[in-house]
Image (cartoon, rainbow, N blue to C red):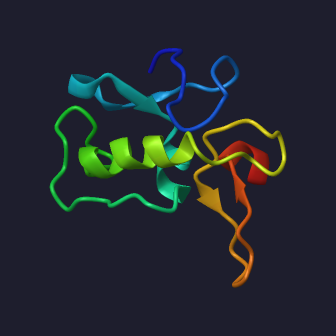
Amino acid sequence: MEKRTCALCPKDVEYNVLYFAQSENIAAHENCLLYSSGLVECEDQDPLNPDRSFDVESVKKEIQRGRKLKCKFCHKRGATVGCDLKNCNKNYHFFCAK
């Protein structure tokens, strides 16, 4: 792992970023990927990332969606983790929500 900016949250220095799709130059924290509302996890494993495999197109769409959403905690864009309460429409970054 190397220090990179996560495509789904503003954390870059304090946490190691997991390469998600090297061919697309997308890097993200594993938990940011796991808890984002609109991602699809694939059954086929990526040989460059054998632990988890997410659909690249759904990740790209989620990054675009996150650019429109502000985190209720830090007020920065990229908040792709939705609140778990039924009628709540608040969004957070994973590290802001935990």
Q: Determine the image quadrant of residue 87.
A: bottom right
Q: Quadrant of the N terminus?
A: top left
Q: Position of residue 4 (x, y in %)?
A: 51, 17
In the rendered view, tell whether residue 12 sits above or below residue 77. Answer: above
In depth, the one of 53 and 1 nearer the eye is 53
In depth, the one of 83 and 51 nearer the eye is 83
Q: Position of residue 9 (x, y in %)?
A: 62, 35
Q: Position of residue 81 (x, y in %)?
A: 62, 57
Q: Give the residue at the far front of this rendering.
A: 68
Q: Please tell me which residue is depicted at 49% across the width and 55% down the height of the picture.
A: 34
Q: Please tell me which residue is depicted at 53% across the width and 29% down the height of the picture.
A: 6
In the rendered view, tell whether residue 52 sits above or below residue 11. Answer: below
Q: Give the residue at the far bottom of this rendering.
A: 86
Q: Determine the image quadrant of residue 83.
A: bottom right
Q: Give the residue at the far right of this rendering.
A: 73
Tell me if 6 is positioned left or right of 64 in this view.
right
In the rendered view, tell whether residue 11 sits above or below residue 45. Answer: above
Q: Please tell me which residue is depicted at 36% across the width and 28% down the height of the picture.
A: 26
